[in-house]
Image (cartoon, rainbow, N blue to C red):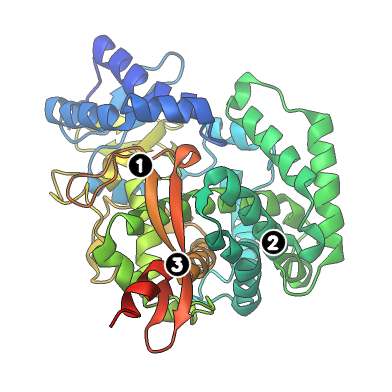
Amino acid sequence: MGRIARASVVDSLRLGATVLAPVLAQGVILRRPRMTALAQALDADRRAVRLLHRMRTKYGGGPLLVRIPLRPLALVLTPEDVRRVLTDTPEPFATDNREKRAALGHFEPDAVLVSHGRLREDRRRFNETVLDSGRIVHRLSDTFQAVIREEVGPLAQAPTLTWAEFAPAWWRAVRRIVLGDGARDDTELTDLLNRLRADANWSYARPRRSGTYRRFTSRLRIHLDRAEPGSLAALVAQAPVSERTRPEGQVPHWLFAFDAAGIALFRALALLAVHPEHEDSARAETGGPSGEAGPPAERPFLRACVQESVRLWPTTLAILRDSTSATHWDGGTLPRQTPFLIFSAFVNRDEESDPSANRFTPHIWLNGTAADRWSIVPFSRGGARCAGENLVLDVTTGTLAALLARGRFRVESPGSLASDRDLPYSLDHFTLRFAVRQVEPVEGLGGRSLQDRAVHAEP
């Protein structure tokens, strides 16, 4: 057995500046608008992906040990190694990575993602029970879809749609879904969470704001204690727990994850807006202008569009693991407590294994292609696959259906999106802007925009 490939000092500096620094600058836990815009302007993700391709060619498949001061990390560069790391989670590749523990400790120190061993099993079981991980359709799906139509559907009646207009409506829906109608207008709760998440971007470089954390958890417990029927909070109150589960410690991550879900569906809307050949397929699943689409099983194409959005523009910029024992590779052995990093944009868009990796290809989620490729991991895979994946896809596809049923969307900004060329590696949701034409039902024609209605009324 040979030696593990080690990046030279120069290449380590280059990787740090080109791959790691932009990830940290944008905000791993809460996106920073200015840094996200700068990363898009500099095409930072494309530069990072190109460099990782060169490193894989130069050093081989890896893992590639990068000489980070005090804590060298192993970059995972091949689909085979991605599969091994994710399949062998949580042993020997643990989710409670040191940097992740420090970051999430600011607002969810008891989350399953930073738990290990039997404690992790206990908390994972609780998450899967409440989130209905094994079911495509959550038991409360009908209630959630009604909330979405109420809160987000009316946005399609305005002439424009931006993130600044979408986000408040989305968060009202999220608070109702997670905590009940009584939390609908509790913007202070999510403001406190975002303050803590902003601190979490700094990981262990910034101490936790104990006062802010106490205020956040106090408000959260009020909503959880109410256990309002039709919300996840009601299921939290009914789920079996142990003295170590800490149910209130799991809920912050659900709120955190729904932030990423909103970003993904907003980008999916942009993908459909610039790919009219796919927009018609998506619109067919909306249920018409009422927006009352069928269950998720009847929305496979919309589901595929959200999955494709996360593949193209991962909301988790990097997947981190720490090894709990020495691990053996073709190139040698890496010691216990080695941090492993999977750069999401690189593995999800591996052009060497898929020439169409930079195009909008929702069909890969329908024909089994994506399932067969371990280079595609939008919701992670293996033992730490997102417990809320089906719930997120249920809610986001319902939101897309509600919007598409009532409006037709055209991307006004940015101008880099087009169906006839490769998609950019970054899409800043903060600056994404749509022009909207309202859809009105026309007998025999289904949902048509007002302009389309005039066209079809001509002799």
Of labels 3 and 1, earlier in sequence is 1
Is the residue under label 3 in contact with that under label 2 (CB below 8 Å)? Answer: no
| x then y, percent, for residue 60 | 15, 31
Which residue in the protein does label 1 denote?
A: 344
Q: CA–CA distance between discs 2 and 3?
A: 24 Å
Q: CA–CA distance between discs 2 and 1?
A: 28 Å
> Regarding mark 2 in the picture, which secondary structure is present there?
helix
Which residue in the protein does label 2 denote?
A: 178
Q: Quadrant of residue 228?
A: bottom right
| x then y, percent, for residue 281 | 31, 73
Closer to the camera in the image, 339 or 225? 225
Q: Quadrant of the N terminus?
A: top left
**Compared to 443, does 146 lie above or below?**
above
> What's under tag 2, amino acid-wise?
Val
Of labels 2 and 3, earlier in sequence is 2
Tag of residue 62: none
| x then y, percent, for residue 254 | 63, 54
Q: Quadrant of residue 155?
A: bottom right
> Regarding mark 1 in the picture, which secondary structure is present there?
helix
Of labels 2 and 1, earlier in sequence is 2
- Judge the density around disc 2: few (<14), some (14-19), many (≥20) Cα neighbours within 10 Å: many
Q: Quadrant of residue 455?
A: bottom left
In front: label 3 or label 1:
3
**Compared to 220, does 37 lie above or below?**
above
| x then y, percent, for residue 375 | 26, 50
Closer to the camera in the image, 115 or 385? 385
